[in-house]
Image (tube, rainbow, N blue to C red):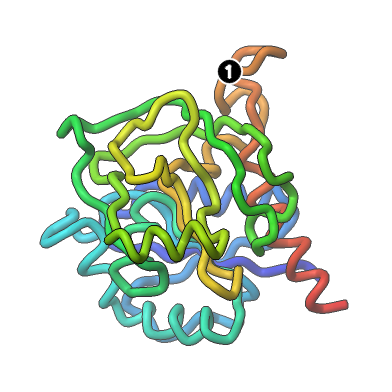
Amino acid sequence: MTARIGVVTFPGSLDDRDAQRAVRLAGAEPVALWHADHDLQGVDAIVLPGGFSYGDYLRAGAIAALAPIMSEVKDAAAKGVPVLGICNGFQMLVEAHLLPGGLIRNANQQFIRRDQKLRVENADTAWTNAFSAGEEIVIPLKNGDGGYIADAETLARLEGEGRVAFRYLGVNPNGSLNDIAGLVNERGNVVGLMPHPEHAVEPGFGPDTAAAMRSGEDGARFFASAIAALARVAA
């Protein structure tokens, strides 16, 4: 049975169609969800895509975290449904308290766009099981409010519990504490990260690699991971 992965569109979402395409290329059925609804349409997993929801007013992701559908997203996450927050979606997850800490303006006060090297720190989540711990990957990044912050106690807990999912390598593009690029919740089903895996899912459109220009497909394994995790649950 084909997995159904919902992608929520908010006013100001930019990468929802890209996320839907990534889901389709991975072999699942993308389901378009709307921010103002209270219906997840029975999806097996959820993606909160990148963009500038509600114009990033108040704080990035702050208004979206209070959207009607987020009540259902939080209930689903509590039941173990895989949820992936990408960039603005990561901001929504911290604003909705599904992940700890916060995300603030980049340290250089500028919007950053680059192909970013990451190290996989946790390969045991619903969205990272197709990777190996310690593996280095390259994923496009584009954000203005990607600086991850948390108090010292929270940082120590995240590190001690292995809940840092990804860490920036080579350069920290936004001043995130501990070079944190992505986090996972205690249960392992909710992952948030600033880089955009949906932009690295097919040859000709991803980051450059040693093999060829624009050939990077590391992002495809995020969506393959979710499909594999769902298959194990269904078995």
Q: Nearer the viewer, residue 123 or 78?
A: 123
Q: Residue at coordinates 18% horizontally, 55% vertically from top-left?
A: 56
**Dot 1 crowding, Cα within 10 Å, few <14, some 14–19, many 20+:** some
Which image quadrant is residue 13 in? bottom left
Residue 81 vs residue 227: left or right? left
Q: Residue at coordinates 30% horizontally, 45% vertically from top-left?
A: 146
Residue holding disc 1: 208
- Measured from the top left, where is residue 204 in percent x and y? 62, 22
Q: Residue at coordinates 32% horizontally, 58% vertically from top-left?
A: 91
Residue 183 vs residue 12: left or right? right
**Vertical placement of 75 versus 11: above or below?**
below
- Measured from the top left, where is residue 225 in percent x and y? 71, 56
**On-image quarter of the C terminus:** bottom right
**On-image quarter of the N terminus:** bottom right
**Vertical placement of 216 versus 184: above or below?**
above
- Measured from the top left, where is residue 25 in percent x and y? 69, 46
**Vertical placement of 95 versus 203: above or below?**
below
Q: How many marks?
A: 1
Q: Residue at coordinates 46% horizontally, 62% vertically from top-left?
A: 158
Which image quadrant is residue 125 in? bottom right
Helix, strand or loop under label 1: loop
Query: Residue flagged by tag 1: what amino acid is it?
Result: Asp
